Amino acid sequence: MKAIFFDIDGTLLTERPLIMLFLPQVYDTLSKKLGISKGDARLKFLREIAERKNTYEWHDWNFFFKSFGLEFRYEELIKSYPHKIQVFPDVIPTLEWLKEEGYKLGVITSGPEYQRLKLRITKLDKYFDVIVTREDVKTVKPDPRIFLYGCEKLGIEPREAVMIGDDLNQDVYGPRNVGMTSIWINREGVEDYNFATIEIRSLHQLRSILGGFEK
């Protein structure tokens, strides 16, 4: 193996603290705008998100803000509350080890350009040789094109790369379909009967797993 690709949200970091901070503000603003209760505003907003699940737009908070005529911008929320974007504790030691071992490192995300901002704010961007967002290929995971583009940017074949992520459909089955090795990081111990080929609970487990592959 020559390269390791990572998903961002749920794999390298969590934005959940930021989401829990701004969603009540969204519901409050929307309830006043539409003249409905906060509870109804919450249901309306979340229903729209659910109906768009796994589409191109679903990966962009700004799409939903704009859909409801709200003036929130996710980039500004990230900049205003950078401490709410939290890196998992196993990430930096793992990335430093992978770099020392000579692996090329990349990110493949279905999110828009503000994903790069998350990586800059958390100082993770310096570890990666390539960062691929949906804007680079105008598509999202598990479309084969986004994985092939990442491999092409690193000058490697898909069979020489590993993809690690927390979403079975996007990060496991998608890359597997183009010949990459996929690893499901299941941080919360979710039960799933569509078993991943390789499942880990922590990135620290990569040391033993990668030892079984030829570089």
Image (tube, rainbow, N blue to C red):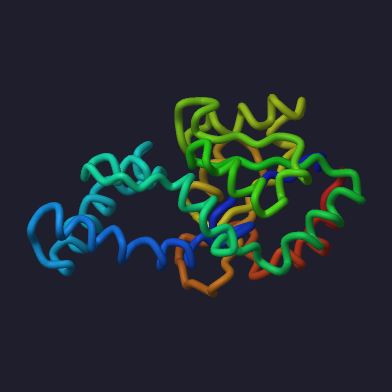
Q: Residue at x 31, y 62 (%)?
A: 25
Q: Quadrant of the N terminus?
A: top right
User: Could you tell me residue 8's position as x and y percent?
Assistant: 59, 51
User: Could you tell me residue 69's position as x and y percent?
Assistant: 22, 42
Q: Report the number of discs.
A: 0
Q: In the figure, is residue 90 to the left or right of 63? A: right
Q: Quadrant of the C terminus?
A: top right
Q: Residue at x 64, y 59 (%)?
A: 198
Q: Residue at x 58, y 58 (%)?
A: 82
Q: Nearer the viewer, residue 55 or 47?
A: 47
Q: In the figure, is residue 5 to the left or right of 184? A: right
Q: Residue at x 71, y 50 (%)?
A: 124
Q: In the figure, is residue 11 to the left or right of 69? A: right
Residue 36 image-quadrant placement: bottom left
User: Could you tell me residue 77's position as x and y percent?
Assistant: 46, 52
Q: Nearer the viewer, residue 114 or 207?
A: 114
In this rendering, the answer to whether 103 lies above or below 206 is above
Q: Give the residue furthest to the left.
A: 35
User: Could you tell me residue 203's position as x and y percent?
Assistant: 71, 63
